[in-house]
Image (tube, grey):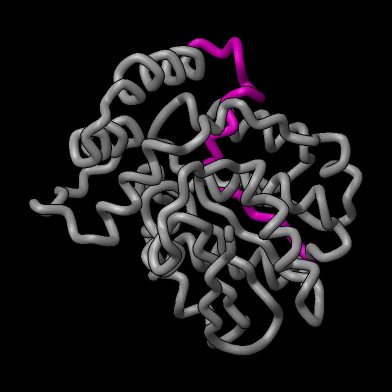
Amino acid sequence: MRRLHVDLIGSGPRVVLVHGSVASGAATWAEQRVLADRFRLEIVTRPGFPPNPPVQRVDFALDAPLVAEHLAGGDSPAHLVGHSYGGVVSLLAAAMRPEAVRSLTVVEPPCFGVAAGDPAVDRFVREYQEEVVPISDPRARLERFMGGVGSTMRLPDPLPPALAQGAQMQIVERGPQEAEIPFAALRAAPFPKLVVSGAHHPAFDAVCDVLERELEAERAVIAGGGHSVQRVGPPFNERLNAFLETAA
């Protein structure tokens, strides 16, 4: 049975945090735990990622309804924040239950289909399909995947169990470029939107440019963390906090 694991920290307005590929919710949002002095953080870990058991398929179309259900199950609308693949999930979930969303923040969601035709996007997707997808060894694939999104983290050898499971889930992950983002529904939804990019790769910049325009969203560019913009800590947290306070 597919289910979300949710860690609850702090008190105040709800903030639902959705992680991307490989890392769990707790690992992805470690630098945001300090926000628990102002908000009730609901750190989601999607099916397949520790402490959840592995799944045969990671798919944004399967995870989005679970996040939408979680949003609607709270005692008040929630600020929804999604990173990378979790940003794609969050875009879809917000459109499913807009009445349960107080604001939407997405951090470099790789919904490359929205910017198809852009040379940098087309090249990124092509290289991913040709150079990453064929790799079946989890460690080798993770190294190539991380290099492609600008990560400089050195992988331990052997991989810790949680990271090894996350790497295996990346192998069975549906390509996020297949996601069809419901722009009209999101644009019509009354909650404010924020799109965050990291100024590290023109393909992600191009996607965020489209999202900013089509969602009529605010835009933040925060360099220094590569694709994992949230890991720069204070600069990201200050911008997010300011947006959440305004949205509240």
Which region of the structure is painted magenta? 102-119
Residue at the spot x=41%, y=55% of the render? 54
Q: Nearer the viewer, residue 153 or 3?
A: 3
Q: Is residue 7 left or right of residue 219?
A: left
Q: Is residue 26 left or right of residue 176?
A: left
The stretch drawn in magenta includes residue 57: no
Spot occupied by residue 152 in the image (x, y as percentages of width and height): 21, 44
Q: Is residue 220 visible?
A: no
Q: Residue furthest left?
A: 157
Residue at the spot x=71%, y=30% of the render? 180
Q: Nearer the viewer, residue 206 or 178?
A: 178
Q: Nearer the viewer, residue 198 or 148?
A: 148
Figure check: 176 above or below 31? above
Count up the numbered dots.
0
Q: Nearer the viewer, residue 222 or 16?
A: 16
Q: Is residue 173 left or right of residue 90?
A: left
Q: Residue furthest front?
A: 1
Q: Quadrant of the C terminus?
A: bottom right
Spot occupied by residue 7 in the image (x, y as percentages of width and height): 51, 78
The stretch drawn in magenta includes residue 116: yes
Residue at the spot x=89%, y=55% of the render? 190
Residue 8 sits in quarter: bottom right
Q: Quadrant of the N terminus?
A: bottom right
Figure check: 226 above or below 118? below
Spot occupied by residue 170 in the image (x, y as percentages of width and height): 39, 41
Figure check: 158 above or below 247? above
Spot occupied by residue 96 in the image (x, y as percentages of width and height): 82, 51
